[in-house]
Image: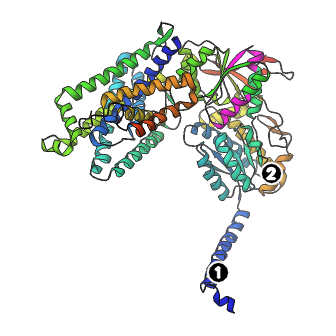
Amino acid sequence: MNVQNNGTPDAPRLRGTLHATLGAVILALAALAPGLAHSDTIKIGVPVPLSGSSAAAGTDILNGAKLAAAKINAAGGVLGKQIELVPEDDACDAQTAVQAAQKLVDAGVVAVAGGYCSSAALPELSAFHRAGIPYVLDASTNPKLTEMGYNTVFRTIGRDDQQGPFAASFMKNALRARTAAVIDDNTTYSKGLAQNTVDALKKMGVDVVYAESITPGQMDYSPTLTKVASLKPDVIYYTGYFSEAGMLVKEARQLGLKMTIMGGDATNDPTLMKTAGPAADGMIITTSPLAQFLSGAHDYVDQYTKTYGQGPGPYSVYEYDAVGVTAKAIADAKSTKPAAIAAALHKINSYPGLTGTIGFDPKGDRSRAVYITIIVRGDEFEPYQRQDASGKWEMMK
Amino acid sequence: MSTFLQFVVEGLTIGSFYALVALGYTMVYGIIRLINFAHGDLFMVGAFVGWTALGTLAAARLPLALALVVAFAASMLATGALGVAIARVAYQPLLRAPRLSILITALGISLLLENGVLIAYGAGFRTYPHLLTQTGFDVLQVHITFAQVGIVAASFALMLGLYLFVHHTFIGTAMRALAIDQDAARLMGIDVERLIQLTFFIGSALAAVAGVMEGLFYTQINFFMGFVLGLRAFTAAVLGGIGNIPGAMVGGFLIGLLEAFGAGYVSSQWTDVFVFGVLIAVLVVKPTGLFGERVVERM
């Protein structure tokens, strides 16, 4: 008695309010939960940049997802339900990405297939992992994404630490380069690829005479190029995005630099040729195969072009497979519980995707990743060289 | 040595753009003490107007030289008019309000312009036709393109013209009077509102010239291009002494040279650190800038 009287007089009332609030929340949740469980569609989140400088790439990816969902739904959907895509704009920006991921979690997605910029995908991944939702990445190639120790992350594309050694091997064995300059643009993706390339080059005995970052959004990179020219590398490898790549190659040729200029897979965009004009001719790009160079994807290219009035871009076909493999996992799991879907994704080892046979290693990376080189001829990309099974370089076609 | 001179050539080219845009910052500040944060975006709008004009004219099969002249003129007129409209609608009603209101309005206008162009033209990159010759000549092993010479010459000519206009014409004198004391200028019968609008017109038109030259020289434009350049031009204006026209020119070229030497001799990764380090250093050590000591007489 005494003790109770000594307590603050408001305590019981406060506790009462608290109970009421909690009760209301629980009621609200309870009201919401059946809505989720009995919804008529299976929601798959698609976080991609739909605004900002990467908006074009994000739109391509979303279109790829739409084609995949349309095909699955036309064939009766999954577990008797239709797939519903929930796109969300992450603007290629870490902060926006966190909000985008939260919106998708709140929208009740059971799995996520998408992503473009690694710097946005990383915070998204953490948010989805906390919610236990599997994330199948289609275009984000930073190794860190599958090195977080999460069992909910997968990707249908290769990773930079596979691309780096690939590019290095091309420079050393196909171009016979003895010295190289590697330039990145200070973003997570670009720095990662540059670092892996530099490591591989050094291991192969190629002298890396220049390895630094440029500031994206600047227009004039001639001072950097003048510096690089004075070091006389046999090849320049730029690991950033296409808009700056166009500037770099144009300004390099303007300065009279004659060496081979190469780009990473983010330079794989026709804006490169539009910006640089004839200067882009002969630029070589390391990339995951484009849809048009994949023997299994000709119908996809036709259908995409017919539906959207333009080419499918570099990554939409990987998103098509990401949505496809997610749907397959839902069907395998016979459940729309995120944890069950993640477990089913881990078991997939021979899904026939457009980009080749898809299986995941324990980290969630593709067990068989493929890279090729392409070359700019006029204002087109053409297939150039690839490694055969024994590691020898051969011309494609 | 030849590398050093090459950096000088590159720095002057980059600096020309900063200087032209810095003039707009400095003129507006000189007259109404406003840091017009939307100015970098007027540069961007100028580039887009020029791109549209060139596209239309090319479709009409106009001779190239004529098309270029018309594109420059159209961009200067349209961007200048936009600058005047912004001044009338957004800034002039706030001239007697606290400083902060007008500064925040300027930031708002900047966002409005960026996102307006984003909606109108989309997020992707637009490219100018490749009209400028890539050829040039070599002096002392330094490679200089004709386009670079043209850009530096054009910006010098414009700056000189502006300086002469402000210091040797009747309207220019009225502008300087306005910069010293707005109320006194009004009492002397100067039409303050018209003069403010004229200042915005000139500043915006100069930014438009820079925008179209940028498009022609670097070929790539997008809605966000005014941001980085605007900040650096602003730094140039502060370095030269904001409110001072020759100061803006010198500041622009100095920032351009700093960028080139920084990228060339230290690391291109540190460009922003150098440029904005200068901004901070100037603000701390000598807030009036290099040429800003004559506080009474601005511009």
Residue at 50% across, 31% down: B274
Q: Is residue A4 left or right of residue B299?
A: right
Amino acid on which the number 1 mark rests in the picture: Arg
Q: Residues within 10 Å of mark 1 (few under 14, many from 20)?
A: few
Residue lying farthest left? B188
Helix, strand or loop at disc 1? helix
- Work out how far the residue at label 1 is from the one at label 2, CA to CA, in angstroms: 41 Å
The span shown in magenta is: A170-196
Amino acid on which the number 2 mark rests in the picture: Ala
How many marks overall?
Answer: 2
Q: Residues within 10 Å of mark 2 (few under 14, many from 20)?
A: many
| First reached walking from the N terminus: tag 1 or tag 2 | 1
Residue at 55% across, 22% down: B265
Q: Chain of mark 1?
A: A
Front-lying residue, A239 or A383: A239
Q: Is residue B64 left or right of residue A97?
A: left
Whether residue A26 is situated above or below residue A112 in the rendered picture: below
Residue A357 in percent (x, y) is at: 82, 36
Residue at 61% across, 49% down: A88
Q: Residue A176 lies in magenta, yes or no?
A: yes
Q: Residue A244 lies in magenta, yes or no?
A: no
Residue A285 in percent (x, y) is at: 68, 23
Helix, strand or loop at disc 2? helix
Front-lying residue, A300 or B284: B284
What number is the disc on residue A342?
A: 2
Whether residue B101 is situated above or below residue A321 in the rendered picture: below
What number is the disc on residue A15?
A: 1
Q: Are marks 1 and 2 on the same chain?
A: yes
Q: Chain of mark 2?
A: A
Whether residue A230 is situated above or below residue A293 in the rendered picture: above
Residue lying farthest bottom? A1
